[in-house]
């Protein structure tokens, strides 16, 4: 733990770290939402075009369309795992901050006790 002069400095550093971690989670969630919307739109457009061209029932089209759809879903699931990891890191960071705060306060109490002796 870095030495902070005041509890306020320590808490400010903790708040900044938590805010940064939360922003990372939010940005990742926003990215996945955007990716999902774009992929859904693209799938709809390709399906509409395939229907217009009369190939929507073609086995090769259906196979390729399914392959792309599966890849899209796999990417979304992988992103969800990454986001879950970010959230776990945020929880660990919060626990670490609690310990650091307790240590800081204990050190202050110890310093005060030493001065009173």
Image (spheres, rainbow, N blue to C red):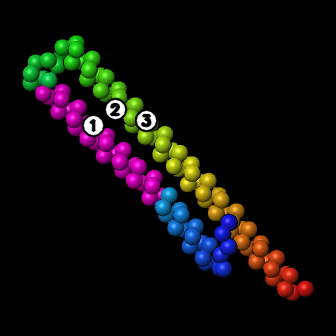
Badges 1 and 2: C-beta atoms under 8 Å apart?
Answer: yes
Please state the extent of the stretch shown in magenta in the rendering. 22-49
> Neighbour class for label 1 at 10 Å: few (<14), some, many (≥20)?
some
What residue is at 65 percent from the left and 59 percent from the top? 96
| Marks 1 and 2, how far apart at CA | 7 Å
What residue is at 66 percent from the left and 69 percent from the top? 2
What residue does disc 1 label? 39
What residue is at 60 percent from the left and 72 percent from the top? 11
Q: Kindly identify which numbered label has been placed on residue 72.
A: 2
Q: Position of residue 9 (x, y in %)?
A: 60, 76
Residue 47, compared with residue 13, is above or below; it is above
Q: Is residue 30 left or right of residue 50?
A: right
Q: Position of residue 59 (x, y in %)?
A: 22, 12
N-terminal of the two: label 3 or label 1? 1
Q: Secondary structure at mark 1?
A: helix
Q: Secondary structure at mark 3?
A: helix
Q: Is residue 30 magenta?
A: yes
Residue 114, compared with residue 73, is above or below; it is below
What residue does disc 3 label? 77
Q: Position of residue 8 (x, y in %)?
A: 61, 78
Q: Magenta: predominant secondary structure element?
A: helix
> Neighbour class for label 3 at 10 Å: few (<14), some, many (≥20)?
few
The furthest residue to the top: 59
């Amino acid at each position: 733990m870095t030495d902070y002069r005041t509890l306020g400095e320590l808490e400010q550093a903790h708040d900044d770290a938590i805010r940064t971690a939360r922003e990372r989670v939010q940005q990742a969630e926003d990215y996945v939402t955007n990716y999902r919307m774009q992929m859904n739109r693209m799938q709809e457009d390709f399906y509409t075009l395939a229907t217009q061209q009369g190939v929507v029932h073609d086995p090769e089209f259906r196979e390729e369309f399914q392959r792309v759809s599966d890849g899209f879903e796999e990417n979304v699931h992988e992103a969800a795992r990454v986001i879950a990891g970010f959230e776990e890191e945020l929880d660990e960071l919060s626990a670490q901050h609690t310990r650091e705060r307790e240590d800081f306060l204990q050190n202050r109490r110890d310093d005060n006790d030493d001065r009173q002796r």
